[in-house]
């Protein structure tokens, strides 16, 4: 448009600035027109998303560089081109000197864009690892079900009931999601308990019972390795604590036990009562509900137990016995997985960010 050698020195400064601004806007428009179809073809991203992701964050830098460039033009006009001004050699050195901060800013901008891309890739990797970790935990529960022939269906029923309790008690969506996932994997620590103990045909006592009790700590150790699952690990650690303090592994009392752990304790115990176990036949739904009433305020949080009993009374026998619970279906629809942030899409090489117009 206007060149340093053929015109800006004869034009008013306002016209030069306006021409520079128009050139910058035209450059951004052209850049967007070229980039948007490529992003749509390669990543399926619409124009609005392209603007927000690849252009809008960088506009302040572009206009800053444009302002610097126009400032250089002004310096050139004011000092290098005035009558009797400095020699051509010094004017060239002046321009080169003024370009140094611009070059530094360009380098800083490129470094920022590179770090931003690395951060996006690391975030994508972290989310992917969290999802893979949950899939690994699911596989452990499935493997445990092969050993115990009980765990997966039991965990699905506990997840169904516990999540309904959390909803009935008006817990937040996040707490409901934690309840659902914690219920699905609450027995994952049993993977470290010997088969002969899990399938012992009578009541387990003594040293064997001590091994059973370790499944809470085992599950906590497995899950706490991922920072995102700290809350989940704590819920699983305390899901066998009793309201009167006679539970394990610590012996917490009353509301010192996390609420979600108290909810899972009720659903877990009820599921155990209405299921066949190696040491006894399943209780009837009515008998199991009678046990919940009997031990409310002792083993169970009375508020949680009362809420669950009212809920059971509103459903049919199939629901009361957990007959429709399916572990794979519950896990595939897990709400906590949906709550994890989406994996950022990796940029295509060469189009991570528009070129600056400086």
Image (spheres, helix red, strand yellow):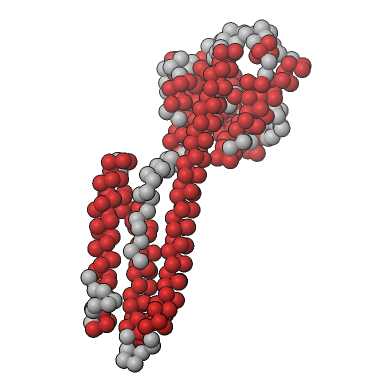
Q: Quadrant of the N terminus?
A: bottom left
**Residue 53 in the image, given as x and y percentages of width and height:** 36, 51
Q: In the depicted view, which residue is nearer to us: 195 or 286?
A: 195
**Residue 190 in the image, given as x and y percentages of width and height:** 63, 21
Q: Quadrant of the C terminus?
A: bottom left
- Residue 4: image quadrant is bottom left
- Using the rendered image of the protein, determine whether residue 294 is visible from the camera's viewpoint: no
Residue under the image location 53 percent in, 22 percent down: 139
| Whether residue 204 is situated above or below residue 39 in the rendered picture | above
| Whether residue 190 is situated above or below residue 7 in the rendered picture | above
Query: Residue 218 vs residue 20: left or right?
Result: right
Residue under the image location 35 percent in, 53 percent down: 54
- Residue 85: image quadrant is bottom left
Q: Which residue sits furthest right?
A: 206
Query: Residue 21 vs residue 243: left or right?
Result: left
Residue under the image location 66 percent in, 7 percent down: 201
Q: In the depicted view, which residue is nearer to us: 53 or 9?
A: 9
Residue under the image location 43 percent in, 17 percent down: 324
- Using the rendered image of the protein, determine whether residue 55 is visible from the camera's viewpoint: yes
**Residue 256 in the image, given as x and y percentages of width and height:** 65, 39
Query: Residue 267 vs residue 343: left or right?
Result: right
């Amino acid at each position: 448009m206007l060149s340093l050698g053929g015109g800006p020195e004869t034009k008013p400064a306002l016209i030069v600035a306006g021409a520079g601004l128009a050139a910058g806007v035209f450059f951004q428009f052209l850049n967007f027109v070229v980039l948007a179809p490529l992003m749509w073809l390669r990543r399926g991203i619409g124009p609005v998303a392209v603007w927000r992701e690849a252009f809008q964050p960088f506009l302040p830098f572009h206009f800053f560089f444009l302002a610097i460039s126009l400032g250089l033009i002004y310096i050139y006009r004011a000092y290098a081109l005035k009558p009797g001004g400095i020699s051509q050699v010094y004017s060239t050195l002046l321009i080169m000197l003024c370009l140094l901060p611009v070059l530094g800013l360009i380098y800083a901008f490129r470094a920022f864009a590179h770090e931003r891309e690395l951060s996006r890739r690391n975030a994508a990797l972290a989310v992917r690892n969290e999802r893979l970790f949950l899939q690994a935990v699911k596989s452990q529960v499935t493997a445990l079900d092969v050993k115990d022939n009980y765990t997966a269906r039991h965990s699905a029923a506990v997840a169904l009931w516990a999540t309904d309790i959390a909803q009935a008690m008006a817990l937040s969506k996040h707490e409901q999601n934690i309840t659902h996932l914690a219920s699905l994997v609450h027995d994952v620590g049993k993977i470290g308990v010997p088969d002969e103990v899990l399938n012992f045909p009578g009541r387990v006592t003594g040293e064997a019972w001590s091994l059973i009790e370790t499944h809470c700590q085992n599950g906590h150790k497995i899950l706490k390795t991922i920072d995102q699952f700290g809350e989940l690990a704590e819920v699983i650690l305390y899901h066998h604590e009793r309201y009167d303090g006679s539970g394990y592994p610590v012996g917490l009392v009353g509301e010192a036990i996390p609420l979600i752990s108290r909810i899972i304790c009720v659903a877990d115990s009820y599921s155990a009562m209405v299921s066949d176990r190696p040491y006894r036949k399943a209780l009837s739904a009515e008998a199991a509900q009678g046990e919940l009433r009997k031990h409310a305020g002792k083993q169970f949080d009375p508020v949680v137990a009362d809420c669950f009993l009212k809920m059971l009374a509103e459903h049919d026998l199939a629901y009361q016995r957990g007959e429709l619970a399916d572990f794979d279906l519950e896990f595939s629809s897990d709400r906590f997985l949906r709550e994890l942030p989406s994996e950022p899409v990796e940029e295509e090489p060469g189009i991570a960010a528009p070129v600056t117009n400086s």
